[in-house]
Image (cartoon, rainbow, N blue to C red):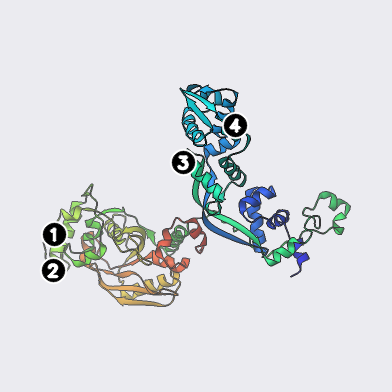
Amino acid sequence: MDLDKVVQSLHPLERKIIPVLKEFSSFNDLVRESGLQEVEVMRALQWLQNKGLIELKEEVKEVIELDENGKKYVQEGLPERKVLAALKKRAIRINEVPEKANITGEELGICIGVLKGKAAITIDRGVIEITGPGEKALDAKSLEEHFLDRLNREQVVELSGLKDEEKYSLEKLRTRKRIIKISIKKIRTAYLTELGKKVSKKKLEGLVIDVLTPEMLKTGAWKKKDFRSYDIKINVPSISAGRKQSYRRFLDQVRQKLMNLGFTEMFGPIVETDFWDMDALFMPQFHSARDIHQAYYIKEPEFGKLDENIVEKVKKSHENGYGTGSTGWGYKFDVKRTHRHLLRTQGTACSARMLASKDLKIPGKYFGITRCFRYDVIDATHNADFYQTEGIVAEEGLNFSHLKGILKMFAEKFAETEQIKIKPAYFPFTEPSAELFAKHPELGWIELGGSGIFRPEMTKPLGVNVPVIAWGIGIDRIAMFKLGLKDIRQLFTHDLEALKKIKFV
């Protein structure tokens, strides 16, 4: 490697740090000895690391720092020194010491214990007097004071690197209030590599110019100058501009695509009733099919309000088929139970509401992007709360071929895959029923959703007498295709670093 070219590429901050790195390695030492700010030192070290001139290490260690009182005592002196200085003039009564020595009553109690332990004072009938050892202590710094000076100078000292006398001082000071503090911190150290050592032997100052001035341009002097070169390959901090959350943006795109296909958006409440969530869908109240929904029921208010005229029609459909040619489920429908509140378990509740609405148009196409909730074991492909995109098409003459065409279109447009499977399935409210599967490049075959043609036992009580094809897609899983995710939980993450890395579509 051409060392001269490396030297030419060095930033002024790097040129200031390299000489210091010959003698010091800790981050705090580099800041102190270079005279640079912390952010400038950190920036210089990162650039030098990118150039291969240093090796940066980061270790978690137990360290000691000055606390609030410690910083004060470094500037003003320890309280015991103030007491000895006051006593050197004359003996003082104990109750006069705080005023004469400019210390607090709390500090006095500590000082007396410390000074008596060093035989620096005597106390007789409430009067404190300095001793010979006390006068000598005034002329030299104590071990504790030397230790505080080091902490003030170096700011952070590793606990494991203390000398015996410093360990003694530590034990004495840590029993006192807010003089020192011990904590766990990341310690950064930097060491010159072999290449860095070679560069450090070169002359670093005055070889190149960092700034092109107007005067140089005016006189043409720049032609004879050597300017610092720029490394266009060097790693630089990434800039993350403001943008919509990736999944939120994806859902907006899905909404726009469906509207472009002629679908009208439909809505419904998150807190639903058993009626719209399951009963209106011709799901029997006693059937095991309800178990997969694992609903969260609301404690207060427990029951909601419903149109009793529609409830009566749905009740008859469950009990005797409501004139559809079906015998229904043949059980006594529980009207009170159908009023129970729950968190919506499926987007099809919105479809049922739409079919019963006076705003329904036939022919008509409707979709909803709905938040649903089910108790589930959370893993890479399952969540307790999730989005569904469901839709219905109501028109004379619709059949299963139309449904297959819609499912294929969804796989291609939203999951961007042509590898799909449509398998027979069972849903209480559709006949025939089918499930859509698509192949993820890494996760393999994933179920995207269910579909079918609504049974007349469901549509007729709601006032609809034409075929209605329906589909419900697990839009969360389609988003995993689009955003390149392997874990469904990442769709809802609040981790900014993770969000920055998610594919932007």
Are the residues at dot 2 and dot 3 in contact (C-beta closer than 8 Å)?
no
Q: Earlier in the sequence, mark 3 or mark 1?
A: 3
In the picture provided, is 290 more to the left or to the right than 500? left
- 3D distance between C-alphas at marks 2 and 4: 109 Å
The residue singled out by tag 2 in the image is 327
Q: Earlier in the sequence, mark 2 or mark 4?
A: 4
- 3D distance between C-alphas at marks 2 and 3: 85 Å
* SS for callout 3: loop
**Residue located at (58% from left, 31% from top):** 132
Badge 4 amino acid: Glu
Badge 1 amino acid: Phe
Q: Nearer the viewer, mark 2 or mark 3?
A: 3
- Image vertical order of residue 75 relative to residue 1, above or below: above
**Residue located at (74% from left, 65% from top):** 198
Q: Nearer the viewer, mark 4 or mark 1?
A: 4
- 3D distance between C-alphas at marks 1 and 2: 14 Å
The residue singled out by tag 3 in the image is 175
Q: Earlier in the sequence, mark 4 or mark 1?
A: 4
The residue singled out by tag 4 in the image is 135
* SS for callout 4: helix
